[in-house]
Structure formats: C-alpha cells, structure tokens
Image: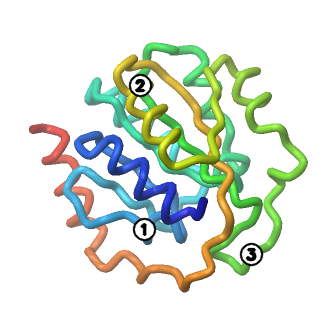
C-alpha cells in the first residue's frame, strides 16, 4: 500500500476525528479541513501534539506519523503507555526512509517498532491492507483507548503533493475552533 492510500483510508474510516499529520510529505497529504492539523518543520512531534489534543479535548485523536519521526522522539509512547484510556490512535506509516529529505534510510529497519511500542505499554497492531486498516481504526476508535498501528507502506512513486499553502496561524486558529465545537 502507498502512503497516500494509507492516509486516504485512515481519514475515510474516521472522517470526523481530529487528525495530526507529521511534517513532510505526510503533512502534504492532509486535505484542507478545519479538524486536520498538518505539522511543518516539527519532525518527531506529531505524537506529543496528538496526545495534547486528546488530553485537552477528550476526543479521539488520529496521529498520522512516520517511522523516522517516531524514532526521532519515541517519548510519547511512554505517555500513552501510562494512560491507556487516552484516546489516541497512533498510525505509523513505515516506508523505511526519510522521504522528505531525499529518501535516506530511517533507523526503523533496525528497530522492531511493535516490540518498542508494546514495551512502552501500548497495544500495537500491524496491517498491510487498506480494508483491514479501515476496519481496525473504526474498531479502535469505538474503544476510545490508546493504540498504535504500524502500516508498512511503499514510498510513493508519484511526486509529492504541494506544500501546505494555508498560512500556519490560520490553520491553528481554524483547528482550535473546530475542536471547540
């Protein structure tokens, strides 16, 4: 499955859930919606931002992250492990590379992400199929608990989507208002 397909599938499965998109190409895949927060220039912070949103809002929050981003800052996994009732669905799109900076290998090839996540105390799943991903996310959202889903993806062959065009302060204001509703 491609990264774009995985993102589209996750968003279609949870259309009303606030979503955080890791920096780089994943943020570029974020549709322009009030309850979507594409991060820019903040590698390693998608999960901590998602945790903060779930804590502040009490709402299930979808975090679309990358393997390199997670491994840059795995500390959020410890927070999730300490609070299993925190409704954060952490989906890691694992393509094994830093796609946004030229495709250099990420350290994920040397790390068993599922074992790392489970060691932190977070329930961990893996799926390689779009329909299974949709069903899994729907079920996990209904449970309203912390969960991690590793989705092995192939690097996208098509050129990346354009950079986020909406000014970041506007995105932040709009996102905050969407959460308040």
What residue is disc 2 on? 139
Q: How many marks?
A: 3
> Label 3: which residue?
103
In the displayed structure, 68 sits above or below 141; it is: below
Gap between marks 2 and 3 measured at Cα: 33 Å
Instruction: Measuring from the top left, give residue 102's x and y in whole percent.
Output: 72, 80
Which tag, 2 or 3, sits closer to the chain's start?
A: 3
Give me the C-alpha separation between circle 3 and circle 1. Answer: 17 Å
Viewport quadrant of the C terminus: top left
Q: Neighbour class for label 2 at 10 Å: few (<14), some, many (≥20)?
A: few
| Frontmost residue, 168 versus 158 | 158
Say whether residue 162 is left or right of residue 59.
right
Q: Quadrant of residue 156?
A: bottom right
Name the residue that disc number 1 marks.
29
- Residue at image position (35%, 43%) is 13
Where's residue 82, x and y in %?
58, 14
Q: Which comes before the other along the chain, label 3 or label 1?
A: 1
Res 81 quadrant in image: top right
Nearer the camera: disc 2 or disc 3:
2
Q: Nearer the viewer, residue 67 or 176?
A: 67
């Amino acid at each position: 499955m491609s990264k774009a397909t995985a993102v589209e599938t996750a968003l279609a499965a949870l259309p009303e859930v606030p979503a955080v998109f890791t920096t780089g190409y994943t943020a570029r895949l974020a549709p322009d919606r009030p309850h979507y927060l594409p991060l820019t220039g903040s590698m390693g912070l998608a999960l901590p931002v998602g945790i903060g949103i779930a804590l502040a809002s009490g709402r299930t929050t979808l975090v679309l992250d990358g393997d390199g981003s997670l491994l840059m800052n795995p500390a959020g996994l410890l927070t999730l492990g300490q609070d299993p009732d925190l409704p954060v669905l952490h989906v890691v799109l694992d393509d094994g590379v830093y796609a946004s900076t030229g495709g250099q290998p990420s350290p994920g090839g040397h790390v068993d992400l599922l074992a790392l996540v489970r060691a932190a105390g977070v329930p961990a799943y893996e799926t390689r199929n779009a329909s299974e991903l949709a069903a899994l996310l729907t079920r996990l959202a209904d449970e309203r608990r912390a969960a991690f889903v590793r989705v092995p993806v192939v690097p996208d062959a098509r050129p990346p989507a354009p950079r986020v065009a909406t000014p970041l302060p506007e995105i932040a204001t709009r996102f905050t208002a969407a959460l308040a509703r």
